[in-house]
Amino acid sequence: MMNNQFSKFWIFIAGRLFFTLAVNMQGTLLAWFIYELTRDALYLGLTGLAEIIPFILTLFPGGAAADRYHRKRIIMISMLAFLAINLGFCWYSFQIAGNGLIWPLYFLIGLTGIARGYLSPAQNAILGQLVERTKLTRAATWNSAVFQTGQVLGPAIAGILYGMLGPRISFLCVAGLIAVAILFIGMLRDIPKPVAQIMAEPWLKRIKSGVEFVRNHKLLFPAMFLDMVAVLFGGAVAVLPLFADQVLHTGPEGLGWLRAAPALGSVLSSLLLIRFSPGKGAGMRMLWAVAGFGLCNLLFALSSNLSISICLLFLAGMCDSYSMVIRGALLQICTPNEMKGRVSAVNSVFIGSSNELGAFESGLAARFLGLVPSVVCGSLITFATVGTAKLRAPELANLDLSKNNL
């Protein structure tokens, strides 16, 4: 990296760290807050559904906007929206909580989905403007490590704050962290605007071209689909409050560590990938990692010991991080800069939306199949998908990332 690029990259990484920390604190606070108010798995599942619908509806316009307008401004406006929404959660905890009205929380969660639909493509697309092409794999790995670090610290801090101070002060702390992230992003300078011909293209044409690019790509499409199925069916994050309460018999502090364990494993995996960059055999190791993710979640569902459960989620996070780093590197290397907003939007539909749809699926399955059987079934679906990918996507299985020339 040149010095100027080096500085811009680390400014962006600092802002991303504070924002990811805040968002993951918010997620843990909301999960336990809603569970305390309702004591119902279905309401936890509806939390994901309330965010995913507006998220999906705004993702493709958000991706098109990221390839037409100033990406830094889109990030700033979206983060300001997150700040306002978080203050709304704080207001709810002061004024409404306890009177039986739950819908204002879901309304605010829906607004979060809209803001995220514009933030996600712009945030992913801008990374390629901050570093040289030869540094993209390393930059994607650092980006993943910082993202996962926020996921480690956020739930742990949120659980401690919630147990000590309650939801009101905790939501105010989240708002402060979002404000710090906005200050860092505001420090970015000299970020190029989209090229003229991209600005002249109609919205629908731009959106369609991004979808077609991913659909016809022999590496991006199977990698995104593989991770989507694993997250949609194989995870147990959405129903962790139930496992914490009904199976492991712990409180909000224990829930915080359960939610932090996968991200802690992801941080370690990302740091190892920084030191030992993925090269030859990256594709097969990715398939094994996704299979390992499913196996760890399967064993977690059968565990009744808190320490063992935390270790299994830690290992699941390590496996998940490997596939996430490979997918992130593929997106940056395989996609032209002028299309990264739209391709990032498609990636978010596959991966980002599967988190919320997975939350809804987990809550629904836990309600009707039972808590443990729902996670076991999801793990079996993950195994079947890995086998299918090995047979139907040989280019992914033979992936070599020793050179950034895909």
Image (tube, rainbow, N blue to C red):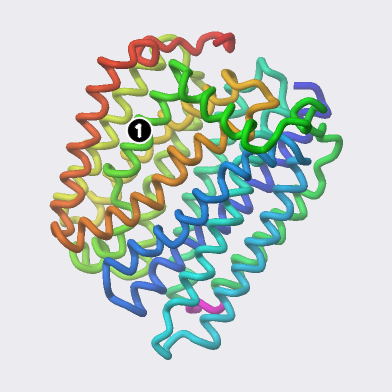
Q: Is residue 397 above or below residue 360?
A: above
Query: Considering depth in this image, is 261 or 22 the residue closer to the camera?
Result: 22
User: Which picture quadrant has residue 229?
Assistant: top left
User: Which picture quadrant has residue 386?
Assistant: top left
What is the x, y in percent for residue 272? 47, 27
Does 166 appear in magenta?
Answer: yes
Residue under the point 29% across and 53% down: 361
SS assignment for the magenta stretch, majority: helix
For label 1, count other residues whose C-alpha is less than 10 Å away and answer few (under 14), some (14-19) or many (20+): many
Query: Considering depth in this image, is 22 or 217 the residue closer to the camera?
Result: 217
Number of marks: 1
What is the x, y in percent for residue 68? 74, 36
Residue 142 in view in this figure = no
Secondary structure of residue under mark 1: helix
Q: What residue sits right under mark 1 in the picture?
A: 319
Kind of residue sitting beneath label 1 = Cys
Query: Considering depth in this image, is 107 or 181 the residue closer to the camera?
Result: 107
| Image quarter (top left, top right, bottom left or bottom right) of the C terminus | top right
What is the x, y in percent for residue 197? 78, 25
284 sits left or right of 144 in the view: left
The extreme bottom residue here reads 99
Q: Is residue 361 above or below residue 208?
A: below
Q: Is residue 179 above or below residue 354?
A: below
Range of residues picked out in magenta: 165-169
Q: Is residue 357 above or below residue 188?
A: below
111 sits left or right of 235 in the view: right
Residue under the point 66% across and 41% down: 122
Residue 217 in view in this figure = yes
Residue under the point 50% across and 86% down: 96
